[in-house]
Each structure stands twice: as structure tokens, then as C-alpha cells.
Image: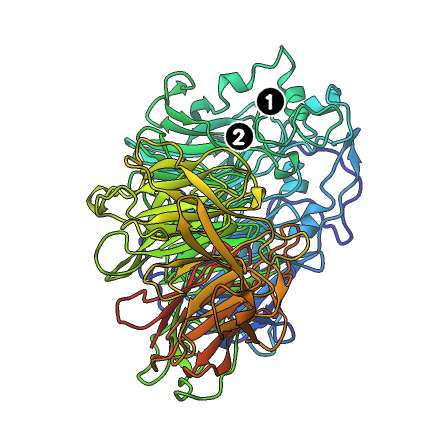
Amino acid sequence: MHNAKRSAGPAGSRPSGLVRRAGWGGIVAAAMAAHAMAADWPQWCGTHGKNLVSAEKNLPSSFVPGEKRAKERTVDLGTAENVRWGVKLCDAIYSTPAVVNGKVFVGGMESGNGVFFCVDAATGKTLWQWKAPTRQVPKAIDGFSLGIHGIPAQMGVCASAAVDGGRVYFVDHRFDVVCLDAQGSPPGPEAGSTRVVWRLDMWEDLGVIPCDATNGSPLIDGDLVYVQTSNGVDRNTFQDPASEVRRKLPAPHAPNLIVLDKRTGRLVARDDLDIADAILHGQWSSPSLGKVGSRKLIFYGGGDGVLYALEALDAVPDKPVRLKTVWRHDCVPPEYKQFGGIHPVIHYCLGDRRVKGTLNKNDGQFVGMSEIIATPVFLNDRVYVAIGRDPAHGRGRGALLCIDATQTGDTTKTGRIWTYQGLDRTLSTVSVADGLVYVSDVAGRLHCVDQATGKCYWVHDARCEVWGSTLVADGKVYMPHAKGLTVLAAGKQLQVLSQVSLGAKFFASPVVANGVLYVASTGGWLWAVAPSPKAPAGKDATGRKPAAQGAEESPGRISPSAPDRFGWVEAAGRRWSHLSTRRGDLPLPGDSRQQTAALIADLDNDGLNDMVLGFRQTGPAVVAYRRTKAGWERCVLEKEYLPVEAGGAAADVDGDGWTDVVFGGDWQSNQVWWWRNPGKTQWKPDVSWERRTIKKRGAAQHHDQCFADFKGLGKPQLAYWNQGAKTLFVADIPADPRRADEWPAVAVFSGSAGEGPGKYAEGIAAHDIDGDGRPELLAGNHLFRFLEQGRWSAVKIGDPGGLIQAGRFLKDARLPQIVIAPGDDSGPVKWYECRGNPWDSASWIGHDLAGRIMIHPHSLQVGDIDRDGNLDVFVAEMAKWSERKAEPDNPKAQALIFYGDGKGNFRKTVFVEGMGFHEARLADLNGDGKLDILNKPYNWDTPRVDVWLGD
């Protein structure tokens, strides 16, 4: 074998030799326990075909990682949910675990060293660990500048291991293939003695010069171990793209794929590929294996962007041989190579956003050369693989291919079944399940395409970088990314079930074994995730006894990273069942992180209230939740993007017996829209409701709307604010609203309605205040009465203005009372009683309800929450409203319930503290006659929806 010339190796370097039975990575032992083997996960992707799909069932759709205890290096299970254990193993984990015989095997980095752990799957206790320092390599070899100094020390052992026959095989950060005794050292005096069975040094023995890192995961077939070497070239960012150095490989004769005798580590075969001049950067694709006809093939994704099928060995040969290439398929679409005749390597470099003169604007539009980093997936005579680039190079066009594995020779023109080009560059290996293919791209988008045709069904944008790969199991798609983990429903309809924050990036991939999901973060933490046991009788969902009814309220402190008050909780003197998208009780509404509107209405005429939510930033713009026997079913009313503002109203606009919905545009739009309810028999998950305009010109922003028969016409009118015009309008429903594109509207009021400096008027409601049997219009801090066509009278109630509601807090009073909260501003919350003529401002007397300044109390509702016959008031603050920072603006935000006694007295209770509320709604959501609470934060821990069902 060729050996490239080098300067002196690392301290402690040893004589050259192909195989050694002793290594110098230390193994630290601890107590061990035996476990029966069941559905293990013995290698990268679980099986030889490398399809990231599992048949495991009863997996959680969400989990709460729990609070991390730094000193103990464990998580507090009392604050976790659906977590068996969580442990901090090291500084960073980039590798994906393997699970065999009750043990979890995973690599990582600790203090710049590579580490490898064997962990008890039942407890998370470390049984033993292996450790070795990072190799010291020269800065240049034969004039080639090397850049592999930092990454091995940052990532440590980043390749996934394979476990077979009591041994564990992995590629380490020192460019070695290592075989360890999976049992590790026995406990006792011998603990710490080395248990390395053999080790092959690809740097010294094979002349391999890796690019960035060695991350090829071993593939074991019988007595053979297939390993890709990561041989490549680190094309220095500061070199001229046209430099000859960029065209050359430092080790052109080194192997790309090797085969070892798994018993001894002896080299028995290598590839016969002559691709040194075509390798673009590194080689990071791990091999897969499949049987095509009577022949076993190894599928290898080359650093030249070509997928190769090589004939697998039947047995261990006596002497080293060359693997025969059966077919090759160029995975880079031809149009990605058309670049004015520029050399492909230069073209590749100009696609790096970091180089001088780059043509890549990092917007995902750059079209150019890519290599294969993902692992090829073999299934039913087809291979599925995507192309991509080093994430540091920036965004660019990728491609996902489906290739016929039965052909021979160059199959580039004849073997391609379909190509999907709707994704960015990717590192991710696909998951193929139930006729669908799932793959993430580096830009953070998860694509679901048809297995037979490549047609895209949906794309979910996590809005953060993705290095790992999806796992499909139990009807769910687990998507790792830089913000944690997103869980989606598997299928042709996009449905986000939950999002989990790990407190660090999740750049490995999730795996499942024996009913447990394993999740590792770049922060060095490893979690074992499984459904929490059901609470015993008499205990709540956390396993604790509920507080006695009527006990003193202790606020539930909920944070985005560890919400710990789910299930049955005691709040504001009542027991509630707290359900949330954070733990999968409800499906996530969509991808938007700006949740603006909320509305309650019975859309399907089943006698139960449904929840309607509006969003901006991205589609879907409007979704509804229908109550079913199993919980809530998500339905999309508007799948496109619209800048929906807070507010919303519902009424049967077209008189067909079905309730329709109305929302207005925000500061970006001068429109107000209504959506026609087609009737529940016509609802289709992927089809938006018919949308028509109510207003389509004039000023922008329409925060708050309501329907009521203000004029006494026997049918409702629509009242709405137009903040851009500082005007309140009332519009009549046209005779044929489906044909009208604008409703005739009359300005009721213009000017200030109690808003603070720099703020806008908001808040709207309808209530019969003067007792004439016709509802009045309440808006801001004013009360409005219709007099005759085109004329309205107005009276100011008090200061400040904002969200406004009315009800009888004084049962013996002649007229109802009014309560006002400052909404998007800060100030007191007051309730007002009328002691005279309601159309005389001086008659309205205000009372401070909260006893303090409330900060952005953007939720105000009135109802008999405790069912004592007296009206109560629900007021809640926002925790976050700023867009440019991640931390909350108001971390101690409170949701308060003021229990009324019907005599003007209120008992203040804290419902929840530390959670963001926005446009919360008070309504019976499950048909039991009791008032429940719906909350959707604006941009705190979003997307998120919470429901509290009253006991």
C-alpha cells in the first residue's frame, strides 16, 4: 500500500504495522448489568440497507428533557416527562448511538480528546469508557496546506459505531479503525486496563489524508468490516479558486473504501475507483449493502458526487483484493455542472460562500457541484440518496435521487427513476416508509416526497441548520436540528406534533431500540426517552397527589425549556387538566413563530366549540382545531401565507347554516378577509377554505373585529378597527357576499381611544349596556350606540383604553359593568360601573382590579369560571413581544383570575406565572358545561398551543 511522506507523528507514535492487538486508548470500567437482547439498534441506521425506519411502537410524540443538574451530570426527573434518564457524558456528542444487549455505545469529545462510552441502557450509568488524545498533524505535506487540526478536537469521535459478536467497531478522531471488547474491563483491581482488540491506523498504514474529520460508520457483513476512509483534500478557503492546489488530492493513491477482517483488523480489500482528480472536497458517506438478484452489492457515495455499486465479498480472502465496480451513477444533475466551461473543481470552490469572489449569496439559489455526504439507502432494488456540501460552504441547490440498482455500467442516463430538486444541499440520509421518502436539508427544511414519483407533498421549515437525519417510527417523523427535535406525523399531510428544546444543537440522529428513543446533543447530553408510566389512582399526571380543592394557590412556573405543570394541576384554586402541544396533546398548528389571532366558534355544528388560530410570518395563515373523541383534530383553513393580525370574528356570513370566520391584515396589509365554511362534509385537510375580501384598500392594520346586530336589522354587522386610519368601521354584510369583493362600511369613530403615546387603539366587543335590547359597540375606551343611518353616538368610559369586555359584576346594578385592560401597552386594569346616565362619561366610575401595573395584558375574558353564579375576570400578560431577541421581555408574566362575588368584590389568584399569554380565550372547549382556557403565546416558545380544561 502507498504511504504518503510525513513529518514526525504525534508523541507516542509507534512503529508502522498493519494490525496491532493492543491500543493506548484507556478503558475505565464500572459495574455492569446483563440485559436480554430484543429489538436492538446495532449500527448506523440500524440495518445494512440504512433505511432510518423502525417498527417500534408506543413511542412518545414529545418529551420534556428536564432541568439539568450540572454537578450530578444528570437531569432532574421530577421536572422531566417521558424521560427514563438523562446524563451528561462529555463536552460534545456528534455521533449517533448504537444499542445492543442493554448497552448504549456512543462517541464524543471531552477536553479536546476523543471519548467512547458504553452506557447501561436501563439507568444511563457509564459502564466503561475509552479515551485518546487528538492526533497532531503537520500543517502542510508536500506543499499541500492541511486544515484538519481543529475539527477532530472539536467533535471527537463523531462516527457511529457498529456492534457485532461482543465487539464494537468505530472510526475514531485519530483516523483509526478501532475494535474494542464490548464488555469493557471488568470491575475491581483490573479496572482501567486496555481492552482494545485491534486497531488500524489509516493515516500511517494506508496513507489516507482525511478532510476535516473521519466519520465513516463501519458496515459489518459476516466476518468483513467495510469502512470509508474520508480521504480528501481540505481546500483552503483563502486560496485562489483557480489554484492548482485546489485540483489535487494530497493522497491520490490512498483507498476510498476498505474491507477488513473483523476478527483481526487485517486489510483484505479496497476499492478500484480512480477518482482522485474528481474528488471535490471530502468523503463522508458511509456504505450500505443490499442484495440485487443473487448478488450482494455495496453502495458507496463518492466525494466526486457519483454513487458506486461494488460487488461485496463472499468470504475473507487470503490476500488483499480489489472490489469490482458493478455500476456507477453520477448524482449531480447535468444543469448543475453548466458553468461557462469552468473546471468543476473551481466551480465547486466558487460555490463556497467563504471564498473571495464567491458566486454564492447563501440564499439557496446557487446551482453547482456537490458530493455525496448522506448514506445511500437501499430498498427493493432501488437506492435513494441526496447530494450536498460541507455546511460551512453555505446554502445551495441540492437533489434527491431514486436510482435503479439492477443495472450495470454507467447508469447515469438509464438508471435514474426520478430526481427531486426542491431541496437545498444536504448531509441527511433519507427515511423511506409507507410509500413516502423523508429527507432534511442543511437549510432546515424537511421534505416529504412520493417514493414512486418524487412528487413533493409537503415541506416543513425548522428555520435552523440540520446535520442529522430523520427517523420514522410509530407513525411519527423525528427530525433533529440545531434547535432540538421536531416531531411530525408521518403521512401525506403536514402535521407538526411537537418541538423539543434540548438546550443545545442536535446534530446526531435519533435512534430507537427496545421501545426507547435515544437523543444526544452537542452539549454532551444523552437522553433515554420513553412514555412516562400512568399515574396511580389518586395522583396527578406527574405522579404527585393533587393539592386539596380550595387550597392556597401556588403559581405554576413554566419556562420554554422545561414546562413542568402538565396533566392535572392546581391553579387559581381549581384543578385543571393542562394539555399542550409541548407534550403532544394537541398537534402543532404550523411553523409560524408569530401567533397573532385566536377565535372560538362551532364550525362543524356538533354543539362543541372549535378553536381557530391565525398567524403571520409563514403559512398556514389560519388553522382550526375540532374537538373529537380522541382530543383535537387540526384543520387548515388557509394554507397560504397572509399577514394575519390579532383579533377575529365568526358568523354565518352567507346564510348557509355554517359559521364563517373573519380576520384582518396587520401593518403589512390593507385587507380584511372572510373564509366561507364549506360544511364539515366538504372539509379537506389540504384544501383552503374559499377566501373573499371585506376590505381591500385604504390604510393598513386591522386589530380586532366583532359581529353583532348593532342596528337592530335582524342580521349582524361587522365592526372592525383600522389602526392605520385610526378609525373604527361598521360594515353591512352584502346581499351576496360571495360575489362582493368589498363590503360597504361606515366610519363610526376616528381619533384616540385611550391608547398610550406611540400605540394604537385596540379592543372590541358587543354588549347591551343601556338595556334597550340591542347590543352596543365597545371599542378602546369608548361605548358606541347606533342612532340612525350613518350616525352613532359615543361616550368615553375611562382611561386607559385597550381590550374591553362587559358583564354584570354587580348583580343588583341597573346596568352592566365594563372592564378594560391596556392590551399592547402597560397600565392598570380597571372595571367601571355606571352610576347614572350611561351616555354621560362622568357617570362611569373606575375601580382598579389588579392593584398593580400590568405589562402587556393582551388577554382579557369574562365568565363564571368557578360556577358560583357570579362573573369572574381572566387577565394575562405577555412574556415576550420583541422579535430580535430570544429571551423573554417579561419573564415573570402572570395570568390572573379575579373571582367575583356579584357585589363588586374580587378575589385575586395567580393562574400561571412565567408563561406568555396572548389573545387567550375563555370557553367551554369539551362540552362539559365548564369554562376552559385556550392560550396561544405570540412569540414566546412558539409554535405552541395550550388548553386548560376545568375540573
- Judging depth in this view, the residue of 342 and 666 nearest the camera is 666
Query: Against 717, is 442 above or below?
Result: above
What is the three-letter code of the residue carrying label 1?
Ala
Quadrant occupied by the N terminus? top right
Q: Residue at x 34, y 63 (%)?
A: 772
Query: Disc number at residue 302?
Result: 2
Label whose residue precedes the other's in the sequence (2 or 1)? 1
What is the three-letter code of the residue carrying label 2?
Gly
Quadrant occupied by the C terminus? bottom left
Residue density around tag 1, few if under 14, some if 14–19, many if 20 or more, within 10 Å:
some
The residue beneath circle 1 is 278
Q: Return the x and y of residue 264 as percentages of the image width and height.
A: 52, 50
Kind of element beneath mark 2: loop
Q: Return the x and y of residue 855 as percentages of the image width and height.
A: 61, 66
Residue density around tag 2, few if under 14, some if 14–19, many if 20 or more, within 10 Å:
many
- Judging depth in this view, the residue of 357 and 763 nearest the camera is 763
Seen in the image, is 512 located left or right of residue 915?
Answer: left
